[in-house]
Structure formats: structure tokens, C-alpha cells
Image (spheres, grey):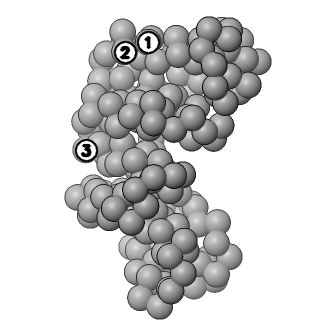
Amino acid sequence: KLNNFAQAEKAYEKYLQVATDPAAKTKTLLALAAAKIGAHKPDEAQRIAEEIMRLQPEGRVNAEARLLAGDVQVERQRFDEAGKAFMGVALLYDDPAITPRALQKAAWAYQKAGKQEEADRVAKQLRDYQSGRREGLMQRFAKPLSEDDIVAIGRYYASQKPSPHSPGDADLVATGRY
């Protein structure tokens, strides 16, 4: 939040040298990769995302790493590739927190890539969850959305730049404020 990515990188790297808990390490790697994106180091962030995917070949952490890989493509201004990465997450994971975020990011990325048809297709998926034509966990989150909400979500994400993840681990925060 303070945009001091270099300091955040150092703190995360220092923590990784002493951390022994695998779950804490992967969360820290996610935060480090996000800091690398914020510092405009997409190649380093990509390597970290790939490492996380190797360490966690499935599950929520893997999904977060895949979203991060999409964010790397956004940083590189490769919006079509980012859209594909985000859609891959939406297709692989039916998670109430991950799936809507992946769909929203995909719609935004396709819109930025000038692929309005793809962006509209992703918005349709949100509408299909909402109407019940498509079932899954996502349905309960999409159902209360109005058409204006869906359009607003697309506009909101179209106006956003990816931001680094904030650490949720109190020990990590204590290791170094950024």
C-alpha cells in the first residue's frame, strides 16, 4: 500500500530464508511475486508463480499462483494472454472467492486486449450463473447482481491496475513493514 516494493521484497526474501512452515512459505512467495510485479519485475514474478504451482499442484494456493501468472501478463501488457490465464483459473476452480475474481479479471483483460467479444462472453458466464443456466458455487454470488452491477464490475476492473497482495500473516507483517 505504501508502494515501497524494494523494501517489501527484502522483507519477504528475509522471511523465506528462516521460514520452515510450507504454508507460510507459499503465502510469502505469493506476496513476494506481487511485490515483484509492483516493482515492474515480471520475469522474477513469473518464476515465483511457476515455483508455487510446482510446490502446490492443486488447490487454492495453486489458483492464486495462476491468477498471479495472469497479473504478470498484465504487467507485460499482454492482455490477451492475461485473459487466457484468468479464464483458465475460472474453468479449473469452482471457488466462491477465486472464480468470480478470475472471471472479472478475464473480462477486464479481454476488454483491454480489444477483444470485446471475449469480454462479453465472460460477462455472459457471470449472467448464466446469476440466472441459474449455469450451476456451481459461483451461482449464489452472481444471482443477486443486476445487469448494471455486471456492467459496473466490468468497468471497475477495466479501470484498475493490478495491485500487490497484502500479507495476511501477522508474523510476516512484523518481519518488515512495507
Kindly identify the amino acid type of the residue bearing the numbered disc 3.
Arg
For marks 3 and 2, give the one nearer the viewer: 2
Relative placement, left or right, of 125 versus 168 is left
Q: Are marks 1 and 2 in contact (CB under 8 Å)?
A: yes
Distance of label 1 from label 2 (alpha carbons):
5 Å
Q: Residue at x 62, y 76 (%)?
A: 173
Classify 10 Å Cα crowding around label 3: few (below 14), some (14-19), many (20 and above): some
- Measured from the top left, where is residue 143 in percent x and y? 73, 17
**Residue on which disc 2 sits:** 118
Instruction: State the separation of the CA atoms marked 3 and 1.
Output: 24 Å
Q: Secondary structure at mark 3?
A: loop
Q: Position of residue 32 (x, y in %)?
A: 42, 68
Name the residue at 63% across, 19% down. Answer: 135
Residue 6 sits in quarter? bottom left
Query: Please, what secondary structure does the residue beneath circle 2 have?
Result: helix
Q: Which element is circle 1 on?
A: helix
How many badges with numbers are in the image? 3
**Quadrant location, the N terminus:** bottom right
Residue 67: percent from the left, percent from the top?
43, 45
| Marker disc for residue 121 | 1
Decide: is 144 above or below 71: above
**Please, what is the three-letter code of the amino acid marked with disc 1?**
Arg
Residue 126 x, y percent position in the rendering: 58, 18
Q: Amino acid at mark 2?
A: Glu
**Badge 1 density bin: few <14, some 14–19, many ≥20, Cα 10 Å:** few
Report the side of 142 relative to 2 (left or right): right
Residues under labels 3 and 2: Cα distance?
20 Å
Determine which of the numbered discs, if any, sits on residue 76 in the image. 3
